[in-house]
Amino acid sequence: MIHGGVTESGSLQSGSNPGGLVENVVSGPGLPAEPPGAVDERPAAAPPGQPVTLAESLMSEAGWGLENFGAEGPNPPYLRIGGKLWVTLTEFEPCFASFRRDRGPFRSKVAIASHLAKYDAIMVDPLAFEECFGPGEGNETVFPFGAWLEIRHVGFGGLELWGKRQGAVTLPLDALAVASAIWLRRNASVPSSRPT
C-alpha cells in the first residue's frame, strides 16, 4: 500500500512529491543543492559570557535572516517593535516584528520577554538613543550606557533593568529597534537573581 508517495518500506515512490512542498532538494547522494563554499548567514549561538548584538541573537535563536531586518539608516540592522496577540485572545505582549512577513510558523514576530529570558544582561550603546530620540540623547544623564544591566521585566512601558551601581532603570522599547546597538550576554557561571 502506498500513502502520500511513500512505499511500505518507507522509501519515496519514484516521481512522487509528498505534500508538494520540496522538490529537487537533494542533488547527488545526500548532498544539499547549494554550491560548494556557500555559507549560512545565520550565526551560531554565542557561548556563555560572549556578548552578541540583538540582531545576532535573533538570527541564531529565532532563525531570522538578514531579510527580516531593515537597512534604511546609519546603523543597520533595524527591527520593528510591535505587539503579539495570543491565540486565546486574552493576552497581548510586546514583540520584535520582522520587516518582512514570514510564512514560517510564527517567525515574523518574536516575543521580547521570551527572547530576552535566554540572556542575563543587556548593554545599550548611545547610538540607540541618538537614533530614536534625537541628537544629545545618548549621554550618561539619560541612561547608563555601556553598563551591563540585569533584565528584570518586559512590558509595554519598557524593559525594567537593574544595575549594581545604577539601581532600577527603565529602557524604552523604542531603543531596541536599533538592533546593532543593543548587546546581550548570558552568563552561566553566575546564577540569575531574577524574581520568580
Image: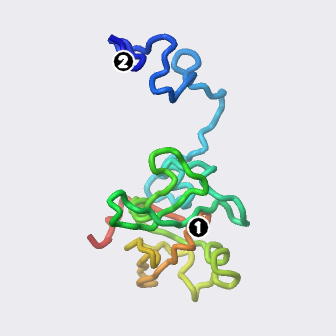
Q: Residues within 10 Å of mark 2 (few under 14, many from 20)?
A: few
Q: Please state if 135 lies on the left or on the right of 65 as rendered.
A: right
Question: Which one is in front, 26 or 128?
Answer: 26
Residue 95 in the image: x percent, y percent? 47, 63
Whether 119 is drawn above or below 2: the answer is: below
Q: Secondary structure at mark 2?
A: loop
Location of mark 1 (residue): 177
How far apart in space, not on screen, are marks 2 and 1 (Cα)?
Answer: 48 Å
Is label 2 or label 1 in front?
A: 2
Identified at 67% across, 61% down, the residue is: 76
First of labels 2, 1 by sequence position: 2
Residue 36 in the image: x percent, y percent? 65, 27
Identified at 51% across, 46% down, the residue is: 44
Furthest residue toward left: 196
Q: Secondary structure at mark 1?
A: helix
What's the residue type where badge 2 is placed?
His
Identified at 40% across, 67% down, the residue is: 92
Furthest residue toward bottom: 141
Whether 130 is drawn above or below 70: the answer is: below
Q: Quadrant of the N terminus?
A: top left
Location of mark 2 (residue): 3
